[in-house]
Amino acid sequence: MKGTLIAYRTSGASKTATSRVAQKLYGQDTVSRGRPVRRKGLLEGLPHVRLIRGVLVLREKDAAAVRQLLEHLGCEVHQRRVDLTPDDEARLKA
């Protein structure tokens, strides 16, 4: 089975910009008016494998949405089509 590897970096961005990328991708727990709130990130609804910071493995059909978000947020993005390991295949079948 084929998948997509996306590597990104915020290349010289401020801490605020870097935090915004993480929030939009992975979500964030915060407090609003004294109540806990979960702000959902794009990857919460998509099966993915996070290899290391800034490197994701996704299904091919989900890659365009992630790439578009990262580019919109000003990240440098590299994308490759890859063969999935059996472990990655199992994690991405959801």
Image: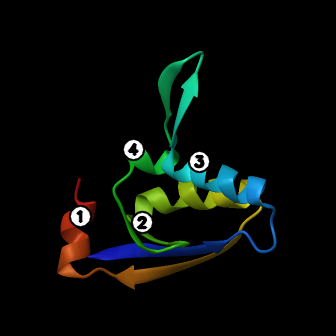
Question: Is 8 on the left or on the right of 49, as rendered?
Answer: right
Q: Which of 35 and 54 is in front in this view?
A: 35
Q: Which of marks 2 and 4 is nearer the N terminus?
A: 4
Q: Which residue is drawn at 23% across and 64% down?
A: 91
As drawn, the label of residue 23 is 3
Look at label 3 and name its amino acid: Gln
Question: Which quadrant of the structure image shows residue 66?
Answer: bottom right
- For marks 3 and 4, give the one nearer the viewer: 3
Q: Residue at x 24, y 82 (%)?
A: 85
Q: Are discs 1 and 3 less than 8 Å apart at CB?
A: no
Q: Which of marks 1 and 3 is nearer the N terminus?
A: 3
As drawn, the label of residue 45 is 4
Numbered disc 2: secondary structure: helix
Q: Name the residue furthest top.
A: 33
Q: Are discs 3 and 2 less than 8 Å apart at CB?
A: no
Numbered disc 4: secondary structure: helix
As drawn, the label of residue 11 is none
Look at label 2 and name its amino acid: Glu
Distance (Cα) linking label 1 and label 3: 22 Å
Q: Earlier in the sequence, mark 3 or mark 2?
A: 3
- For marks 3 and 2, give the one nearer the viewer: 3
Numbered disc 1: secondary structure: helix
Look at label 1 and name its amino acid: Arg
Q: Which of marks 1 and 2 is nearer the N terminus?
A: 2
Distance (Cα) linking label 3 and label 4: 14 Å
Above or below, 11 relative to 35: below
Q: Are discs 1 and 2 less than 8 Å apart at CB?
A: no
Q: Are discs 3 and 4 less than 8 Å apart at CB?
A: no
As drawn, the label of residue 91 is 1
Distance (Cα) linking label 1 and label 2: 14 Å
